[in-house]
Image (cartoon, rainbow, N blue to C red):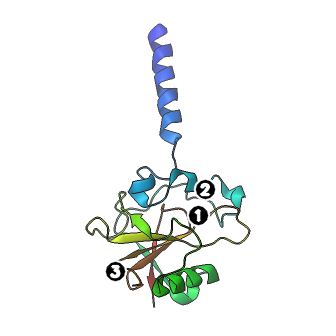
Amino acid sequence: MKRAWVFSCIVAVSVIAGGCGKQGSGNGTEASGASAADAPGSAASGASGPIAASGPQPAGMLGSIAKAQLPAEAAETLRLIKAGGPFPFSEDGVMFRNSAGLLPQHPRGYYRTYTVRTPGATDRGLRRIVCGGPRKQIGDCYYTEDYYVSFKRISD
């Protein structure tokens, strides 16, 4: 009886601990280029949609989205990237490590992340554009509307 109780306590603690930081393991300050303070709290914070319940997309399963299909705020972020700024948030342009491996593999420092404003949000929201290569280049960019859980390659 005592063993069963101890086992169920261990399982409960594991479930609770496993749910902490659900915004993506390894998405700490250096891991993704976003700080812990930037992690969005909930969909009530003005975000544009829930986080996928099925978890991150498998590597190599990237969808695509045409520039014309992006929200207007994402098109504005691409314009700012191409112009080299100025960006609305100091966190924009920091390194994105791709620690979950959802984007094509490149050497550390290849990817940078930028905020896509969310209308009505009081914080940075969930939406980001991650671009690879030299600064001011938008040829290898990806859009996420769920804080790095899934990505779509931005095509012309």
* In the image: residue 5, left or right of residue 98: right
Residue topped by disc 1: 126
Per the image, label 3 sits on a secondary structure element best described as loop
Q: Bin the neighbour count of mark 2 within 10 Å (Cα to Cα): few under 14, some 14-19, many 20 and up.
A: many
The percent position of residue 43, horizontal first and vertical second, equals 67, 57
Dot 1 and dot 2 residues touching (CB under 8 Å): yes
The percent position of residue 34, horizontal first and vertical second, equals 48, 59
Look at 44% across and 51% down and name the residue there: 28
Dot in front, 3 or 2: 3
The numbered mark, 3 or 2, whose residue comes first in the sequence reads 2
Q: Which mark is residue 40?
A: 2
Distance between mark 1 and mark 2 Cα atoms: 6 Å
Amino acid type indicated by mark 1: Leu
Distance between mark 3 and mark 2 Cα atoms: 28 Å
Q: Quadrant of residue 46?
A: bottom right
Amino acid type indicated by mark 3: Pro
Q: Is residue 142 above or below residue 79?
A: above
Nearer to us in this view, 49 or 31: 31
Look at 47% across and 83% down and name the residue there: 84
